[in-house]
Each structure stands twice: as structure tokens, then as C-alpha cells.
């Protein structure tokens, strides 16, 4: 079955579409620009609509990045690197993403975040016993790295549970080469 293409919208309809879209989900400027471009009858209307949204304070990348990063820290406990990567995937400029994440994470202790993350991911399982298995240890390390924590902090945290965590350092050196 062929996919139905949505109708193209004039400037007034595009404004309503932008407001409706932003009321459902917070978006970066580039994400909204891409959505508007798919629906616009005249692509020349898009810059004016984006300016109007910025002036009305409905669209602000720094405010979007701040709330996104704060949410990732508070509710999911991700590390800095993951949040920067996610913001860049949401089309926030790299310098802005770095600046906002550094500000949000300035008071966060990465070691505490790692401990909380491990407790959440491995709840109901005793970590020292589980991490004696080299495969489980490597899996825990990969999960921590994917969650955005630094390699050194991950290894330091895992050393508390397994003496084999020292071997992860040599694996990490090989990956960086």
C-alpha cells in the first residue's frame, strides 16, 4: 500500500502545525525546521515562522538543551558523554551541547552516578558475585561506557567488585589505538 503524503500547508497552517508540534514534544530548532520543510507549500515561509516562535519564546535551543540534559541526569542518571551525544543527535550545536552539559553536570559526582546506575541495572543481583564472571564484567563495563561515563571512572567503580577489572584497562588501550 502506498504511503499517503500529507497535504502541503500555507504559512498560516504551517504556524498552527508548528505550535501543535511543539505542544506535543519539545524540539530543537533544526528538528522543527526539518518537520516544517516536509509540510511547507512554500519553503520561504519557514524562516519567518521560526523567528516568530523564537520571539514568542516557544523555541529556544539553549532552554531545550538545559531541560533535556537535566532530565537525563535526574531521571536516567546518564553520564556526560551520553547526554552530549544525545543532544547532538537531536541537532543541537556541539558547542552549545558541551556548554550546557558542563553546566548541568558541574555539581554531579560521576562515581555516585555510576554506583546508582549499577544498582539500577543490576538490582536484585549481588554485584560482587555477578562480576566475578569475566563476561558479566565486560558487559557491565560496556553498559557503563554506553551510558556516557568515562573509562577511568568505570574501571575504578568496577574494581570495587572485581579484581579482574584491571584487565579492562588493557582492552580500553587497544580500542583507542
Image (cartoon, rainbow, N blue to C red):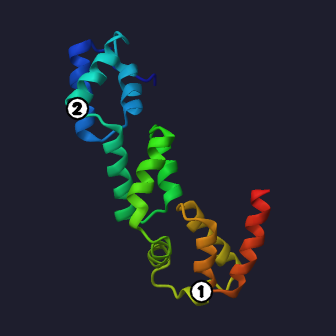
Label 1: which secondary element? loop
Other-residue count near label 1 (Cα within 10 Å), few / some / many at <14 / 14–19 / ≥20? few
Quadrant position of residue 35: top left
Side of 16 where 139 appears, left or right: right
In front: 129, or 22?
22
- Residue 78 versus residue 94: which sits nearer the camera? 94
Measured along the vertical axis of the image, is residue 47 above or below residue 155?
above
At x 45%, y 76%, the residue is 112
Is residue 89 visible in the rendered image? The answer is no
Secondary structure of the residue carrying numbered label 2: helix
Indicate the quadrant where residue 60 lies: top left
Residue 64, compared with residue 157, is above or below; it is above
Residue at point 60%, 86% (across, down): 161
Q: Which residue is mark 1?
A: 160
The residue depicted at 39 percent of the width and 20 percent of the height is 37
Task: Give residue 77's position: percent from left, percent from top.
Answer: 42, 66
Task: Locate the C terminus by quadrant.
Answer: bottom right
Residue 63 vs 57, above or below: the answer is below
Q: In the rendered image, which residue does mark 2 sit on?
A: 20
Q: Nearer the viewer, mark 1 or mark 2?
A: 1
Does residue 147 appear in the picture of this structure?
A: yes
Of 132 and 53, nearer the camera is 53
Q: Nearer the viewer, residue 90 or 169?
A: 169
Task: Describe residue 36's horizontal placement relative to residue 87 as left or right.
Answer: left
Task: Please give the count of numbered marks on the rendered protein.
Answer: 2
* x and y, in percent, of residue 168 in the image: 72, 73
Q: Quadrant of residue 4?
A: top left
Q: CA distance from mark 1 to mark 2?
A: 50 Å
Mark closer to the chain start, 1 or 2: 2
- 14 with respect to 65 (left or right): left
Amino acid at each position: 500500500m502506498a504511503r499517503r503524503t500529507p497535504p502541503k500547508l500555507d504559512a498560516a497552517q504551517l504556524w498552527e502545525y508548528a505550535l501543535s508540534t511543539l505542544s506535543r514534544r519539545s524540539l530543537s530548532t533544526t528538528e522543527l525546521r526539518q518537520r516544517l520543510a516536509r509540510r511547507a507549500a512554500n519553503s520561504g515561509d519557514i524562516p519567518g515562522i521560526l523567528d516568530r516562535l523564537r520571539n514568542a519564546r516557544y523555541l529556544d535551543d539553549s532552554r531545550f538543551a538545559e531541560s533535556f540534559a537535566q532530565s537525563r541526569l535526574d531521571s536516567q542518571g546518564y553520564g556526560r558523554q551520553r547526554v552530549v551525544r544525545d543532544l547532538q543527535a537531536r541537532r543541537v550545536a556541539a558547542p552549545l551541547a558541551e556548554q550546557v552539559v558542563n553546566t548541568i553536570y558541574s555539581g554531579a559526582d560521576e562515581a555516585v552516578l555510576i554506583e546508582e546506575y549499577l544498582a539500577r541495572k543490576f538490582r536484585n543481583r549481588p554485584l560482587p558475585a555477578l562480576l566475578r564472571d569475566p563476561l558479566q564484567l565486560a558487559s557491565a563495563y560496556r553498559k557503563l561506557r554506553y551510558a556516557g561515563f568515562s573509562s577511568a571512572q568505570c574501571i575504578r567503580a568496577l574494581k570495587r567488585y572485581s579484581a579482574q577489572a584491571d584487565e579492562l584497562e588493557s582492552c580500553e588501550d587497544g580500542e583507542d589505538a
